[in-house]
Image: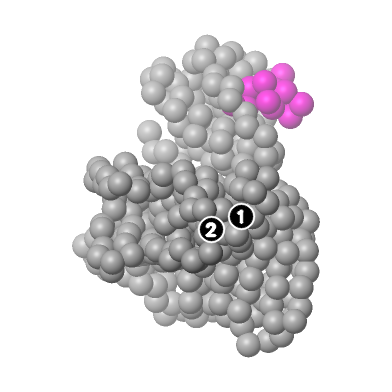
Amino acid sequence: MNQSKIDRLIIKLIENTISDQESDVLKAWLQDETHLDYFNDFIEINHLIVSKHRFDYKPSLESVKTSLDEKSRFKISNLYKYAAAVLIFISIGYVFLTKNKATEDNTPIIVNNTIKTGTDKATLTLEDGSSVVLGEGQQYISDKVVSNGKDLIYETSQINATKLKPSIAYNYLTIPRGGQYLVKLSDGTQVWLNSESQLKYPVHFIKGETRAVELVYGEAYFDVSPSTKHSGAKFKVLTGDQEVEVLGTEFNISAYQDEATIYTTLVEGKVAVTEGSTNTVLSPQQQSIIKKGIAGIEIVNADVYSITSWRKGIFSFDRMPLEKIMKVLARWYDIDVIFIDSDIKQDYFTGILRKNQSIEEILESIRTTNNIAYEINNNTVIFR
C-alpha cells in the first residue's frame, strides 16, 4: 500500500476518526513486523518536537494491534501509552499549507530524475594542506584521528604551555552540498556539521588556554566539553564578525554564505554573543540574530527543537515560506531550484519530514496538500 495512505490512516487513528474498515487495513499492514520500524522512527521525531527527554519505549506488534482494537476508547491522555506504536500526526512527515488554492492540474513532470538523498560525507584538510575524502564505507586512520565513514574522532589530548608557545596545527572539515558529518575534537567537544559548511579547528588545544574554533561558513551544532574538565579553559566559536563564548554546553549556529544573517540558538547552558562593541548573554530557548553589515544583536525566543532537528535526521518546518524550504532542501539534495511561478515563493508550510526520504516523496507531500505543480529535470526542481 502507498505509504502516504498508511500515514493518513495513522493520523485518523490518533484523531479517533478512523473507520472500522480503515482500522482493518491498518492492522493488516501491521502483520509485517518490519513495519514497526517505521513507527519507531516517529518516536524520536515526536520527542524531538515535544520533549527534550529521551523516550526509549519500543512497542510490540501486539500493543499496536490492541490500540487499534480499542480505537473507540483512544484518548489523547493515553497518547504516550500507545503513541510509541501508532505515532503522532505531527511526526508523520505530513506537510500542510495554511492557505488553499483553486484545484487545477498539478501532475508532476519527471524527466530523468538524478537527485540523490544526502549522506555522511566530508573533506578533511590536514595541516600540511593535503586532503582526505571521508564518506560512508570509507575508513580513515592516522596517528591523531580516526573516521568510520560517519564521524571523525580526534585522540583526547592537550599540549602543555611552555615559555616558548607551541605552534598549533589546524585542520579544516568541509561538508559539501548533500552531506553532513560529526567531528569529535581533541577536548571531547562534539560538532555536527550540516550541508555546505566548513569548520576550522586545532588538532590539539593548549592546556589552560582558550579553546577556539571557527565556523568559516554554514551551520553547526556544538556540544561543548565543559571548562571544568580543561583547567578552566574557555571555549569560543568565531563566525565572521561574531564571537560566541561558551558558558554552557549546547547551541546551534547558522551562518551560510548566501544568507545575510547569523543565527545563534541556545539549547542548554549559556553563551555570550559578541558583535563589534555589543555583547549579550543568551538563555536556553533564545536566539540571537546578527544581520551582516548592520550593528547590533537582536534576541528572540526560538523553537530550538525545530531549529536543531537537522542533526537528528529531520526537517522541521514551522510556517516557513516555500522559497526558504527549498533552500534547505537544495543543500541536502544538492539540487538547483527554479520558480517559474514566483507567486508561490512566499506560500508557507508547516510539517515534519525525514531527511532519508527521496526528493520526490517530499515534493509529493507539498504538492498533495496544495495545488503546487513541479517538474524534476535531471538535478533541477522547477515550480510552475
Residue type highlighted by circle 2: Ala
Q: Which residue is mark 1?
A: 208
Quadrant assignment for the C terminus:
bottom left
Q: Is residue 344 visible?
A: no
Q: Residue at x 56, y 40 (%)?
A: 45
In this rendering, the answer to whether 1 lies above or below 201 is above
Percent from the top left, x then y, of residue 322? Answer: 53, 68
Graded by Cα atoms within 10 Å as few (under 14), some (14 to 19) or many (20 or more), the crowding at tag 2 reads few
**109 or 339, which is in the foreground?**
339
User: In the displayed structure, does residue 158 sit left or right of residue 87?
Assistant: left
Q: CA distance from mark 2 to mark 1?
A: 8 Å
Q: Are marks 2 and 1 in contact (CB under 8 Å)?
A: yes
> Which segment did they paint magenta?
73-84
User: In the rendered image, which quarter is residue 329 located in?
Assistant: bottom left
Quadrant assignment for the N terminus:
top left
- The label shown at residue 100 is none
In this rendering, the answer to whether 353 lies above or below 372 is above
Q: Which residue is mark 2?
A: 161
SS majority, magenta: helix
